[in-house]
Amino acid sequence: MMVEKIAMQAEEFRLIKEFVADSFGLVLEEGTQRGLAAKLSPRLQELRLKSFTEYYSYLKFSPGRSTEWQRLVPLITNNETYFFRESGQLSVLAQEVLPALKERKLARGERTLRILSAGCSSGEEAYTIAMLLLESGCFSWDWDVRITGVDIDARVLDAARQGVYAQRAFWATEPHLVERYLRRQDDKFAVRDILRKWTSFAQGNLLELADSAAGEQFDVILCRNVLIYFADQTIKRVVDNFGALQSPGGYLFLGHSESLSRTQASYLPLRFPGAIIYQKRE
Ligand SMILES: C[S@@+](CC[C@H](N)C(=O)[O-])C[C@H]1O[C@@H](n2cnc3c(N)ncnc32)[C@H](O)[C@@H]1O
């Protein structure tokens, strides 16, 4: 089918930009109007809509709007990820945070560990954490460990649940870890059951996380390379949501180019060589 590119007026761009920021937190940068029109034109054609004003009304008011949101999200998100991304932070997790958590938990007679990969994309971060936990030797079979990956994009979650990756996903991973935790499947690599045992994936919007994960308390939240796409006021809302999901002493990891402003009083920055992480204040 021939897709005709439909022009987007400045006012239409403003409306869709506002809708996307309010609904998903994502900021559509100025200057991306033409590119967005090209990406969304097939959606208008399929829905038999004639303009982006009609598309905006469809997104806001149509009974089928939530299905359309699922179609829209993959067109505007960046899902780039790989195993062992930002290794400096992961070393801090393995060498400082996991032993500290273990000690604190055992002192309380607890053997549970809850980790959230917020904006998990296709699962590489969650499976990396599972590998780090296993490699650390801190948490044996009698610990109740759960690593939950949450993302707004259903398509990447399917890939996360499949857990089958091309070689390029491992460029930052030591070969012996690939060997130990993945098995060859044709020209790709599938995660072994030992990683799957601790990991699960769920669809969720970080703007509403306090609703969807209510009742959970996470010892560690990783939200890396997600907030760079959000506006400042949305970051505050998302981090407040994280605060509601962590007890004092819980750890928060952001991407290396993302930092919390001084106004985010509920988290204390902890500085390590090559990495800053955050801890929920007492
Ligand atoms: C660049 S990936 C980061 C993946 C991984 N955390 C990492 O650092 O490699 C960003 C992910 O955030 C997800 N995302 C964006 N907005 C979101 C939202 N409002 N709620 C949940 N996930 C969101 C995107 O779908 C995408 O998969």
Image (cartoon, rainbow, N blue to C red):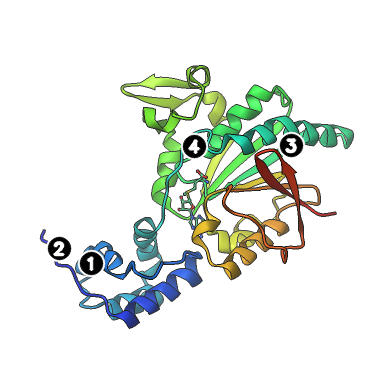
- Residue situated in front as seen by the camera: 274 or 64: 274
Q: Along the polypeptide, which appears first: circle 1 or circle 4? A: 1
- Residue situated in front as seen by the camera: 273 or 276: 273
Kindly indicate whether the residue at mark 2 contacts the one at mark 4 (C-beta within 8 angstroms).
no
Label 2 residue SS: loop
At a point 53% along the width and 33% down the height, the residue shown is 84
Dot label at residue 97: 3
In whole angstroms, how far apart are the C-alphas of marks 3 and 2? 51 Å
Residue 183: which quarter of the image?
top left
- Give the side of residue 132 with respect to residue 22, left or right: right
Category of crowding for the residue at label 4, using alpha-carbon neighbours closer than 10 angstroms: few (below 14), some (14–19), many (at least 20): many
Kindly indicate whether the residue at mark 2 contacts the one at mark 1 (C-beta within 8 angstroms).
yes
Query: In the rendered image, which residue does mark 1 sit on?
Result: 41
Dot label at residue 106: none
In whole angstroms, how far apart are the C-alphas of marks 4 and 3? 20 Å
Q: Position of residue 20 (x, y in %)?
A: 44, 69
Q: Along the polypeptide, which appears first: circle 4 or circle 3? A: 3
Residue 29: which quarter of the image?
bottom left
User: Which of label 4 and label 3 is nearer to you?
Assistant: 3
